[in-house]
Amino acid sequence: MIRRLTGEDHSQCLSLLSPHAAENLFILGDIEAYGYDQPFQKLWGDFSEDGTLRAVLLKYERNYIPYAPAEFDAKGLAKVISHDTNFMMMSGLKGVTNQILPYITHPARSIRELFYAKCERLDQLSLENIEDVKKANLGDLDNIHLLHNNIDEFDATETVEEKRRNQEKGVSRTYFIEVDGRPVSAASTAAENSQSAMVVGVCTLPNYKRKGYATTCTSKLCFDVLQEGKVLCLFYDNPDAGTIYKRIGFQDIEKWMMISFETEIATI
């Protein structure tokens, strides 16, 4: 049976999601921040015959994220999505989204696969030179923004104001190394919640690459977050980057799918 979730389902929802905190970073974070019923956020649950919650479907803005650790009603969740003309994307673990996708009646416009990895342990972290890493305060974020804007392959769409707001809310933090008074390499978190955090914004200026700066920044970030009892996760599509992350201690979970759809609203 599939029905809308409410605050009364919170305990059972956490029991399903929390053992897989990295896999459910977005769902857990959005529940903590916004609860179960907002104009921009809703959740559905798939319950077995005995009333046990076995799958969750989150809609945040125009993006659906499903999660199920085992067997679930894929056709039923697809029906919820198919009845919606005000959405653009479904994203989530490949093993879950691939079961739902064939039943969605809206045509898929594009499909992108990313590697999804997590880090849960401190023992593989290299802590060499981490004393060179600084944790950014609000006053450092202008220079961090300049760093992001000076890297061609980096998608620097976040404004300085958004960086400040996210850091003040505790959903983001940044670590950096500076040379001659300016940041040359950095790593950040995003979507932090009480159980997990996403590693983003790992970057180094071209003239300072191959010095281990990005690895050192990321290692210090991971050390501090893991010390707080959280698990870390990240996306990557570059095999070279994957090698670096695995050396730090990240392990692949599975592929993460991002599927865009043609809907009535989206095609106007």
Image (cartoon, rainbow, N blue to C red):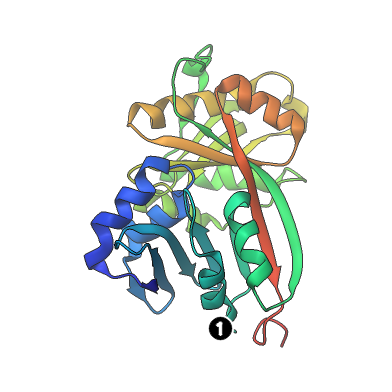
Q: x, y (%) of residue 90? A: 60, 65
Residue 65: percent from left, percent from top: 52, 61
- What number of labels is visible? 1
> In what element is the residue under mark 1?
loop
Image side of residue 9 versus residue 142, left or right: left
* Residue at 62% over, 27% down: 245
Provide the residue designation for mark 1.
Answer: 83
Picture coordinates of residue 216, whole percent (x, y):
57, 22
Choose between 60 and 102: the one closer to the eye: 102
Residue 174 to residue 263: above or below = above
Task: Give the quarter of the image for residue 255.
Answer: top right
Give the residue displayed 71% in from the left and 50% down from the top. 113
Reply above or below: 232 against 164. above
Extreme-front residue of the structure: 49
Q: Residues within 10 Å of mark 1 (few under 14, many from 20)?
A: few
Q: Is residue 138 left or right of residue 176?
A: left
Which amino acid does the dot numbered 1 rest on? His
Work out whether 117 lies above or below 92: above
Residue 142 x %, y %: 54, 47
Which residue shows up at 72% across the image and 41% down it?
A: 237
| Quarter the N terminus occupies | bottom left
Q: Can residue 234 be seen?
A: yes
Q: Nearer the viewer, residue 148 or 91?
A: 91
| Point 71% across, 88% down: residue | 268
Answer yes or no: is residue 201 visible: no
Image side of residue 59 versus residue 212, left or right: left
